Amino acid sequence: MSKSFFKVVRENLMFLLLLLGVILGIVLGLFLNDKVQHSTEFTPRELAMFIGFPGELFVRMLMLVVLPLIASSVITSLTIIDKITAKKIGKRAALYFLVTSLIATSLAVVLARVIIKPRAHEIQEEDRMPKEGSSPVYAILDMLR
């Protein structure tokens, strides 16, 4: 019985670690919520930024890995198929890429101009300057991002 249990755990180790991470995140979130909301040293928004920083770095690293994985997968797939099929697929992929990029760019411009309206509330010059006594922690976190 114990051998089969350890075999199941070993085969599903990544899933179990993921599940443990989710449960740990929920417990820590419930535990730290009250402390964050009633903090006197930092505002709740600043504390949320500090707590969320490792997760933000993790997501950015995943995004950094995705493009090379996709590119290597496409290159590997193209080396397997013959030249004529690769040409057909390449033309379709290029057309698909151009059309979806055109749609995404057009949608972004329309949304930005009509709904979001950038620079509607210009930032005052004194708001751009760093406040006295601001912590260098913010500069370090911005450099790591």
Image: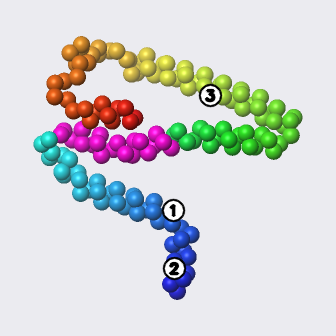
Disc ID at residue 14: 1
Magenta-tinted stretch: 42-62
Cα separation, mark 2 vs mark 3, equals 49 Å
Q: Main secondary structure of the magenta part?
A: helix
Disc ID at residue 5: 2
Q: Position of residue 37 (x, y in %)?
A: 18, 46
Number of residues whose C-alpha sits closer than 10 Å to that of mark 1, classed few (under 14), some (14–19) or many (20 or more): few
In the rendered structure, the answer to whether residue 71 lies left or right of residue 4 reads: right
Number of residues whose C-alpha sits closer than 10 Å to that of mark 3, classed few (under 14), some (14–19) or many (20 or more): few
On-image quarter of the C terminus? top left
* Front-most of residues 120 and 85: 85
Disc ID at residue 100: 3
Mark 1 is on which residue type? Met
Q: Is residue 38 above or below residue 24?
A: above
Report the mark closest to the observer, 2 or 3.
2
Q: Is residue 54 magenta?
A: yes
Mark 3 is on which residue type? Thr
| Label 3 secondary element | helix
Going 69% across and 43% down the picture, which residue do you hit?
73
Q: Name which of mark 1 and mark 3 comes first in the sequence.
A: 1
